[in-house]
Amino acid sequence: MKLVWACLMSLSLCFVALPQTPSATQADAATEKELVAIAQELFDAVAVGNKAPWEKYLADDMIYTDENWQILTKKDLVAGLKPLPTGYAGTIRMANVQSRSNGDAAVLSYRLLEEETVFGQKLTPTYLETDTYFKRNGRWQLIAAQVIVMPSERKAVTIHSEQYDSIVGQYELAPGVNYTITREEGKLIGQRTGRAKEELLPADVNTFFRKGSIRGEKFFVHDASGSVIKMLDRRENNDLVWKKIK
């Protein structure tokens, strides 16, 4: 019995002496922190046209899809880096970071909050970026990235309420599928068959949009006499045509 207890005690001492392995959560957090530091270093280099960090962290075989829908290589990206022109200044910072990592692969998703000054006028665009990193030869390299622009909320213009009169009515996409536009308390309200009402805000006298949405812009087409004859439901510049029936 004494021998058994001695063996158990020695084993327990051995286990206590073993180094503690970090949990997956701790490891993931450490990876995220490292990748955020890399990404921020890359963005800090943009305004001044510093190519060194981009040469260091971008994999030679990377694929980069930018906000202008161009698919770029590392060579393309590095060659395009130049200091901002005279009259321009800007900073980029990361927010809303999320990450997923598994061994030598990791994905980083975040918003980019840009503050840009163009000859004294301030712009604040927001981008959404997702990056994929591989760890090669002991260091993280950016292997793929995709950037999209998150449009700012559109601003409505003021038009005379009587200009709504020619727009009010019913439009048909197909038999039984209608879009009815009415005036309610000075507002232009649209409602598709089977859906909730929505306020239409004017971008100009012929173009209207829904608050909080970048899709489904409504463009109204007039005939020679000025009467509205159809509504174009415009999605990414592709039009669904609704014929005015009432």
Image (cartoon, helix red, strand yellow):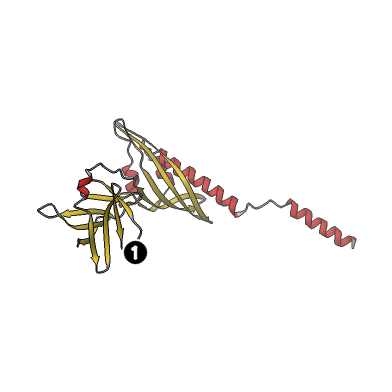
Q: Residue at x 52, y 50 (%)?
A: 138
Q: Which residue is drawn at 40% across and 49% down?
A: 129
Residue hosting label 1: 194
Q: Which of 196 and 44 is in front in this view?
A: 196
Please say if 51 is above or below 241.
Answer: above
Secondary structure beneath label 1: loop
Q: Quadrant of residue 198?
A: bottom left
Name the side, left or right, on which 180 lies relative to 142: left
Residue 51, given in percent of the width and then of the height, sits at 38, 40
Residue 11, given in percent of the width and then of the height, sits at 78, 57
| Amino acid on which disc 1 is placed | Gly
Name the side, left or right, on which 13 lies relative to 179: right
Residue 218, given in percent of the width and then of the height, sits at 25, 54
Residue 216, given in percent of the width and then of the height, sits at 29, 55
Res. 240 visible in picture: no
Q: Which of 137 and 119 is in front in this view?
A: 119
